[in-house]
Amino acid sequence: NYTDDADTARKMVDKYREHYRAGGMFRCELYEGVADMLRQLDEAGIAMAIASSKPGEFVDMILTHLGIRKYFRFISAPAVGQVNPTKCELINSALCALGADSSTAVMVGDRMFDIEGAAQAGVFSIGVLYGFGCEEELTRYGADAICENPKQIPELILK
């Protein structure tokens, strides 16, 4: 549904969040190979963080539910109800928390927002085709590399 009425829009968002909080957020699963990729990067000493536009409390619960929270040292995400920071701001917050330099960091994402935010933050971007984006979108927004599956990510990062 769509509306121009601010009050109706707020009620729709509240209803969505109620459904999401009641368990809708857990109606997801990891793409095949993601857990192995995260384990491999973690064992190689790669510090990882999440830069998400989803509220941080939801991100934390989803990562825990999927059994991969242990791989991420930091979650850069807004609080519920907070005005969403830009993807660039989220990436910069993650870099700061990790003590990482943008020239050696990598952003892995599946949508144009991830690629665009990485470029604005001066970070190398890897677009992934196993998410919601497509190769045309990732290429158009300037992904530095594109991976078809999670196995290719460590091959790029650890080389």
Image (tube, helix red, strand yellow):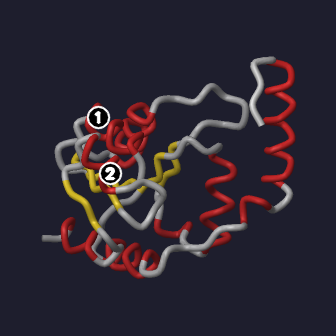
Hey, what amino acid is under mark 1?
A: Ala
**Residue holding disc 2:** 107
What is the quadrant of the C terminus in the image?
A: bottom left
Q: Do tag 2 and tag 1 residues touch (Cβ < 8 Å)? A: yes
Picture residue at 72% right of the left edge, 59% below the top: 25
Residue 101 seen: no
Q: At which x and y percent is residue 142?
A: 23, 42
Picture residue at 49% right of the left edge, 74% below the top: 31
Hey, what amino acid is under mark 2?
A: Met
Q: At which x and y percent is residue 37?
A: 37, 76
Mark 1 crowdedness (10 Å alpha carbons): few <14, some 14-19, many ≥20: many
Q: At which x and y percent is residue 147?
A: 28, 66
- Outermost residue toward the left? 159
Say which quarter of the image contains residue 8: top right
The correct choice, above or below, for 95 with respect to 88 in the image is: below
Picture residue at 36% right of the left edge, 63% below the top: 129
Question: Of label 2 and label 1, which has the lower sequence position?
Answer: 2
What is the quadrant of the N terminus in the image?
A: top right
Q: The residue tagged with tag 1: helix, strand or loop?
A: helix
The correct choice, above or below, for 123 with respect to 69 in the image is: above
Say which quarter of the image contains residue 9: top right
Residue 145 seen: yes
Picture residue at 32% right of the left edge, 51% below the top: 107
The correct choice, above or below, for 127 with respect to 88 in the image is: below
- Label 2 to label 1: alpha-carbon separation: 10 Å
